[in-house]
Amino acid sequence: MDSMFAPSHLSRRHLLQLGTLAAAGALPLITVRPAQATPAMLASAIRNLVGEANIKVGKIRLDIPPLVENGNTVPMTVSVDHPMTPESYVKSIHVFNEKNPQPNVASFHLSPAAGRAQVATRIRLADTQKVVAIAKLSDGSFWSATVDIIVTLAACTEEMP
Amino acid sequence: MAAALVNVPAKAKRGAVIEIKTLMSHVMETGYRHTAAGEVVPRDIITSFICRFNGTEIFRADLFPAIAANPFLSFFTTASESGRFEFEWIGDNGFVANATASITVE
């Protein structure tokens, strides 16, 4: 039995070795899904919101300190320079980021009774990155603002005690 | 357990634009952190915040893990009449918290 199978066993091993080499050559890199959102995810999250509409730059203001020491709590104020009347008002404000695990930060839905289109909160930033705010007006137009922020201590990376 | 802090002016002139500030104590666990043993800490965040004035929704926010712990929100409204603001926070694991504040408009 042994002698009968020995040659085939050898050739099988050779085949396997060849196969492994071939596979290694064909797939030099296996792409690993990143643990953070990518600019492509940011772009698709924005597309999801605006659809085919054109996004204009301006009207909206995004206030975040440009240099952040602690990414765990970053004050952010977003305001839109637009009147708030029942005929024409800011419907919603959406904030996105580039490199947190998820591209969405928050969405705020306003009503004409707001008086002023301004919202403040505190956010987390996992890395030095871009933050994008988009305002949707009642006439269906979209306005955007982008801010680059340097983060020295990133959020989300620390282990639980 | 859920402690809310709400700041609304007690009095305002009719037509004045007033600022409302809210703070809710909550860990806002992102779901992206690991324990030392390598296990993912399950997500536990507040996903939405709603503010109503005399029953009508005036402000709503959808929150994501990128919101810092103890979510703070500040927004504006026009003081049109005296009444009551109702605040509601809704989150993971059946989290619901409420708060109210009254305003007198002259």
Image: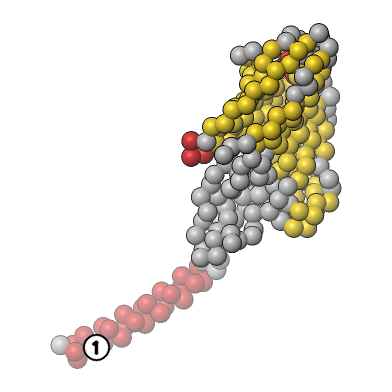
Residue A139 location in percent, x, y? 72, 16
Q: Is residue A157 left or right of residue A73?
A: left
Quadrant of the rendered image containing residue A78: top right
Q: Residue at x 31, y 83 (%)?
A: A11
Q: Is residue A16 left or right of residue B86?
A: left
Q: Nearer the viewer, residue B14 or A75?
A: B14
Residue A121 location in percent, x, y? 73, 37
Q: Is residue A129 above or below residue A143?
A: below
Q: Amino acid at mark 1?
A: Ala
Q: Nearer the viewer, residue A152 or B82?
A: B82
Which element type, helix, strand or loop, lies under badge 1?
Answer: helix
Residue A33 location in percent, x, y? 56, 56
**Mark 1 = which residue?**
A6
Residue B58 location in percent, x, y? 67, 19
Q: Residues within 10 Å of mark 1 (few under 14, many from 20)?
A: few
Q: Total number of numbered labels? A: 1
